[in-house]
Image (cartoon, rainbow, N blue to C red):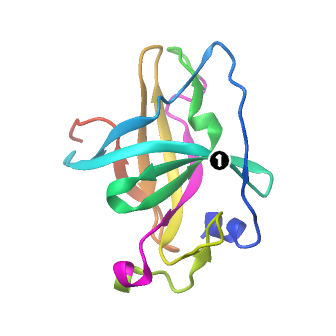
């Protein structure tokens, strides 16, 4: 896993981002729906900023699945305009399940990884976060890969099918 390899020897640090007045931040909590059938998947919530090997990420928590997503800040703190340079851009990050070894069962990766708190995690992988923004809306699509598997469409913040 590209993302989790970077975590093996990294300590996360809390970081603060200064936002320009023309920028907007995703506002904290969003409803989450499956890509395809648009089934409700609970919520996704911004948690905070961390640094991994000199690269910043914004952590997003998905309570229903007990999972933490690591998204580049340029995908979270964006300029809200019709011709935003991040619109439809894919950003690379990662994720970890916060479930116990028993809870993940046979879904566990072959090797466990350590998260930013030093906690052993048994399931995680790579992530792609696609921003869909205009001057009125901040939307996103998430694709996840389990362990070393390639990423596949997973969830988004709108309840539209397709």
Residue at position x 33%, y 45% from top?
43
Residue at position x 68%, y 23% from top?
19
Instruction: Using the image as rendered, state which of residue 83 and residue 3 is in the foreground.
Output: 3
Instruction: Write down the residue under mark 1.
Output: 57
Residue 71 coordinates in the image, percent (x, y) = 57, 47
Q: How many marks?
A: 1
Q: Specify the quadrant of the image occupied by residue 49.
A: top right
Instruction: Using the image as rendered, state which of residue 127 and residue 102 is in the foreground.
Output: 102
Residue at position x 61%, y 25% from top?
85
78 vs 51: above or below:
above
Residue 66 coordinates in the image, percent (x, y) = 40, 62
Answer few, some or many: residues within 10 Å of disc 1's Cα (few below 14, many 20 plus, some between 14 and 19): many
Residue 109 coordinates in the image, percent (x, y) = 49, 81
Q: Is residue 74 magenta?
A: no
Residue closest to the far right = 54
Residue 103 coordinates in the image, percent (x, y) = 35, 79
Residue at position x 57%, y 84% from top?
111
Q: Is residue 101 magenta?
A: yes
68 vs 130: above or below:
below
Inspect this view and state whether residue 34 appears.
no
- Range shown magenta: 85-104
Instruction: Using the image as rendered, state which of residue 9 and residue 85 is in the foreground.
Output: 9
- Horizontally, residue 33 falls left or right of residue 115, namely left
Instruction: Using the image as rendered, state which of residue 112 and residue 155 is in the foreground.
Output: 112
Position of the C terminus, as image quadrant, is top left
Inspect this view and state whether residue 114 appears.
yes
């Amino acid at each position: 896993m590209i993302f989790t390899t970077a975590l093996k020897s990294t300590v996360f640090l809390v970081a603060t981002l200064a936002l320009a007045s023309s920028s907007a931040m995703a506002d904290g909590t969003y409803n989450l729906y499956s890509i395809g059938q648009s089934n409700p998947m609970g919520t996704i919530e911004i948690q905070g900023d961390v640094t991994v090997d000199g690269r910043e990420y914004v952590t997003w928590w998905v309570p229903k699945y007990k999972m933490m997503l690591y998204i580049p800040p340029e995908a979270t703190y964006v300029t809200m305009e019709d011709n935003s340079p991040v619109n439809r851009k894919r950003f690379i990050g990662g994720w970890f399940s916060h479930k116990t070894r028993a809870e993940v069962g046979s879904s566990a990766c072959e090797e466990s990884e350590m998260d930013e708190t030093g906690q052993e995690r048994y399931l995680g992988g790579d992530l792609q976060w696609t921003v869909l923004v205009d001057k009125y809306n901040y939307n996103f699509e998430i694709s996840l890969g389990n362990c070393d598997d390639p990423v596949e469409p997973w969830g988004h913040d709108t309840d539209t099918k397709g």
